[in-house]
Amino acid sequence: MKNFVHRGEVLSLTAPYDVLSGAGFKIGTIFAVASGDAVSGAAVEGQVKGVVRIVKDASVSRRAISSIGTTPPKRPPAPLAATC
């Protein structure tokens, strides 16, 4: 396949803000871990797949961390009323 670029585990992204190597950052629905330091607007390689150990920022709540990269669950449809 001639149009294959790479597996997509590391993406070339634009840093949305200053990021340090090994720190997580989010762009839209993409969460990545920076492979190197980058200032806002600079190119940065971001690991988007795999297991990475990162330090939690004390200013980020557990709820915010658990919602990264997930979509809210859909409500199940209301049960149909049975008429006899």
Image (cartoon, helix red, strand yellow):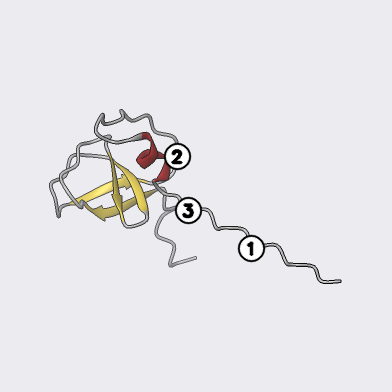
Q: Position of residue 50 (x, y in %)?
A: 45, 39
Q: Position of residue 52 (x, y in %)?
A: 39, 33
Q: What is the crowding at mark 2: few (fewer than 14 residues within 10 Å), some, or many (at least 20)?
A: few
Task: Give the camera-side residue of 72 and 39.
Answer: 72
Q: Position of residue 27 (x, y in %)?
A: 29, 54
> Mark 3 sits on what residue?
72
> Does residue 16 appear left or right of residue 65 in this picture?
left
Secondary structure under the numbered disc 3 in the rendered image: loop
> Does residue 34 appear left or right of residue 51 in this picture?
left
Q: What is the crowding at mark 1: few (fewer than 14 residues within 10 Å), some, or many (at least 20)?
A: few
Q: Are marks 2 and 1 in contact (CB under 8 Å)?
A: no
> Mark 2 sits on what residue?
50
Task: Give the camera-side residue of 54 and 77.
Answer: 77
- The disc labelled 1 sits on which kind of residue? Pro
> Mark 1 sits on what residue?
77
Q: CA distance from mark 3 to mark 2?
A: 22 Å
> Does residue 17 appear left or right of residue 28 in this picture?
left
Q: CA distance from mark 3 to mark 1?
A: 15 Å
- Residue farthest to the front? 84
Residue at horizontal 39 percent and vertical 59 percent from the top: 5
The earlier-in-sequence mark between 2 and 1 is 2
- The disc labelled 2 sits on which kind of residue? Gly
Task: Give the camera-side residue of 8 and 4.
Answer: 8
Q: CA distance from mark 2 to mark 1?
A: 34 Å
Secondary structure under the numbered disc 1 in the rendered image: loop
The earlier-in-sequence mark between 3 and 2 is 2
Q: Nearer the viewer, mark 3 or mark 1?
A: 1
Q: Nearer the viewer, mark 3 or mark 2?
A: 3
Secondary structure under the numbered disc 2 in the rendered image: loop
Quarter of the image holding residue 79?
bottom right
Q: Quadrant of the C terminus?
A: bottom right
